[in-house]
Amino acid sequence: MVIYDDVVNWAGTGQEFVSQNNLENSCRIRIVKLGNAGGVTFLKKYYIVATDLGVDTGISITNNAQILIPLVCATHNIDFHEMLWFEHYPHEDSKSEPTLDVVLPKLMQSCCPSACSKRVSVQWRPARINEIAHLKQFIDLKI
């Protein structure tokens, strides 16, 4: 079930979301809460999809992953280990096809108690066919 679907805006270091008037960076965030279906228990409780908006909205979601992932997780009280983060670029142009990749965050350290202070390193991999098929049950994706 989709529990969140909105465009988010954040400033430089990503300590908090900002109003659209203070727009520096933005993307669409969709959060899907997975339940147990037909006796199947999922390893992750959430899918989080960060979608590029296709306009000049500041730094790309790829270059902001280390900031955006902890910020979204802290805002929605989601543990890193309970989610699978997808990076979605739905736009076709002469240079690229639409893409859907999985971003794998690794918690590096937390120097203070604030969840927004968590630092992560990230790695990317293409989304797997079964992940795409399952995600499409909840969200209409152009890929």
Image: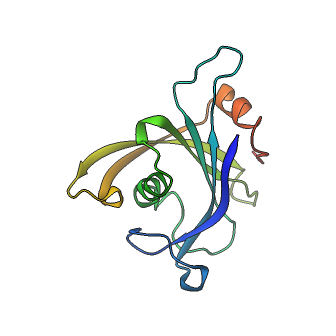
Residue 131 in picture, x, y percent from top left: 65, 30
- The quadrant in which the N terminus is found is top right
Residue 40 in picture, x, y percent from top left: 64, 16
Q: Residue at x 59, y 85 (%)?
A: 21
Judge by depth and name the residue closer to the eye, 11 or 112: 112
**Which residue is outermost to the bottom?**
21
Left or right: 79 in relation to 110: right
Q: Residue at x 69, y 54 (%)?
A: 96
Judge by depth and name the residue closer to the eye, 54 or 139: 139
Q: Residue at x 52, y 25 (%)?
A: 43
Residue 130 lies in quadrant: top right
Residue 32 in picture, x, y percent from top left: 64, 42
Residue 63 in picture, x, y percent from top left: 46, 61
Left or right: 75 in relation to 36: left
Q: Residue at x 71, y 16 (%)?
A: 38
Left or right: 44 in relation to 98: left
Residue 35 lies in quadrant: top right
**Which residue is outermost to the top?**
39
Judge by depth and name the residue closer to the eye, 98 or 26: 26
How many numbered markers are drawn? Answer: 0
Above or below — where is 111 with respect to 123?
below
